[in-house]
Image (cartoon, rainbow, N blue to C red):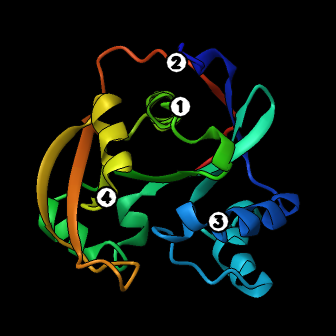
Amino acid sequence: MSDPSHALRFRRTSRNDLPRIRHWLRAPHVERYWAHDTSEAGVERDFAGSFDGTEPSEDFIIELDDEPIGLIQRSFIYDYQEEHSALIELTAAPASALTIDYFIGEPSMLGRGLATHVIRSFSAESFAAHADATAIIVPVVVGNVASWSALASAGFRHMISGFLPPDNALDDGQHHVYRLDRPNIIQPRASAERSPR
């Protein structure tokens, strides 16, 4: 497909987005790798902290031509040190490393190569938004070929493979870990609403 980066936008989530996020999390292609409680209370617990300011995670709705198509998150790995302890040990992650997580929620948007463009654009924007970030480190379940292939296509390099506690009991815990280091010149290709860390 042609490069859609000019039409991408990353909009900070709000309370109005919770029903849509809940709907996406229940889609089979998302549910397989995002093992979340999809009750109203569960979605409130897991996603409201970003816009309420009670969690360090920055959550964004991915929009293409002003239409919401998915979710992407970022945080510094050490902002969730206990949760990411196995990842830190496996990769010797520096305190200056970000991590991201993402999904395309709309089934009609799958299979178009969008994930690569989303990851590339959001990574550039994340380095621009966080001047102290030196790398982005992302673990992906080995079986989620589409996700780690998109990371590789977006310029991430494979660091290591190993065991990390799985989110879904269907998985054996084997993950590939990909890393993108801060480039010398940053040219963000998509706009995003920013908030202070």
Rendering quarter of residue 16 = bottom right
Identify the residue shown where x is 43% and y is 66%: 79
SS at badge 2: loop
Looking at marks 3 and 4 on the same chain, the residue that comes earlier in the sequence is marked by 3
Q: Residues within 10 Å of mark 3 (few under 14, many from 20)?
A: few
Rendering quarter of residue 31 = bottom right
User: Is disc 1 in contact with disc 2, using a CB cutoff of under 8 Å?
Assistant: yes
Identify the residue shown where x is 52% and y is 18%: 1
Looking at marks 1 and 4 on the same chain, the residue that comes earlier in the sequence is marked by 1
Marks 1 and 4: which is nearer the front? 1
The amino acid sitting under disc 1 is Arg
Badge 4 is on which residue?
Answer: 140
- Answer left or right for 38 relative to 127: right
Looking at marks 1 and 3 on the same chain, the residue that comes earlier in the sequence is marked by 3
User: Is disc 3 in contact with disc 4, using a CB cutoff of under 8 Å?
Assistant: no
The amino acid sitting under disc 4 is Val
Badge 2 is on which residue?
Answer: 1
How far is disc 1 from disc 3 in space, using C-alphas? 18 Å
Badge 3 is on which residue?
Answer: 27
Badge 1 is on which residue?
Answer: 112
Q: Residue furthest right?
A: 16
